Amino acid sequence: MKQIVNLTVFFTSILLISGCDEIDPLKTPYKTSGTVIEVTGTQKVLIEDFTGFKCGNCPAAADKAKALSESYPDKVILLAIHSGETFARPSGSKYKVDFRTSPGDELFNTFLGATGGQPNGMVNRSTLGSSKIIAPDGWANEVANQLSKKATAAMEIVPTYNASTQELSVNVSTTWIEEGNADQYLSVYVSEDSIVYWQKDYRKTPEDDSVYVHMHMLRAAIGNFGTWGESLGMQNPGSKVSKTYTISFQGKPWKPEHCHVVAILHNKIEGSIVLVDEKKVKM
């Protein structure tokens, strides 16, 4: 009997000692089969910049976004959404190429509206007052605010480009640190850098710049779920869901070496972004 009591005290002591381990507040542990596993995520921010090549004030806004991405390396992701009839519709002898996209039009019409001014944008689709639209001068404050929050999920993006078939395959694995609700959807986009084309810039003389370098341009939604993506359903802390999506580059002017994959976990009903990440496409 004495031996049993001693063993009980021994194991109780171990449990008490283990229970005193300090847990990093940025790491939310969950238990699987009695084992404590730490899952961590990095809070990142997406700036969606509604723009157009005939918008003379838009290059200055793009510079503000670029400066924020440089101030917070690997934490601020940019997406330039050429959208709307006023500034993005092709016209004349210079602005012939239509850089608008189906997801870009949907985002523009949903959040900014057909009569909305540009440049304007969103920061993690957060709501300020009654709107998610934030003017470029307000991006810095909201980026800092969003980055002060703790990540509630973690994401891994693995893009694979097949040069023979000209197909991009993207695997996105999402692991929840906190419980995920049924309103969370995963959208996956492809963006492209280093596109040299005309851009109106009121800071220059002449204001029509023929060698402007367009960066982070939204090209398309990847997969068959369109702008708003696929529901990932209710998820418990520690749950992991992997999805694979494909898109063909055949017949498109996109250069895969200049492309990135942007994956967005968002609340489809409320609209805000839960998690965002980006990965460069490697040849």
Image (cartoon, rainbow, N blue to C red):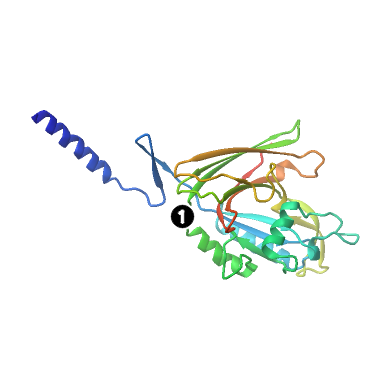
Q: Residue 78 placed where, x, y %?
A: 64, 55
Question: Which residue is label 1 attached to?
Answer: 150
Please indicate whether residue 166 sits to the left or right of residue 232 in the image: right
Foreground pick, 133 / 224: 224
Foreground pick, 2 / 153: 2
Q: Is residue 130 among what the camera can see?
A: yes
Q: Is residue 210 above or below residue 13?
A: below
Dot 1 falls on a residue whose secondary structure is loop
Q: Is residue 12 above or below residue 92?
A: above
Residue positioned most to the right: 93
Quarter of the image with the N terminus in it: top left
Quarter of the image with the C terminus in it: top right
Q: Residue 252 placed where, x, y %?
A: 80, 43
Res 160 quadrant in image: top right
Residue displayed at 63% across by 66% down: 133
Q: Residue 253 placed where, x, y %?
A: 80, 44
Q: Residue 273 placed where, x, y %?
A: 57, 55
Residue positioned most to the left: 2
Foreground pick, 185 / 142: 185
Q: Is residue 154 above or below residue 140?
A: above
Residue displayed at 26% across by 46% down: 20
Amino acid at dot 1: Lys
Please indicate whether residue 38 sits to the left or right of residue 135 in the image: left
Q: Residues within 10 Å of mark 1 (few under 14, many from 20)?
A: some
Res 51 quadrant in image: bottom right
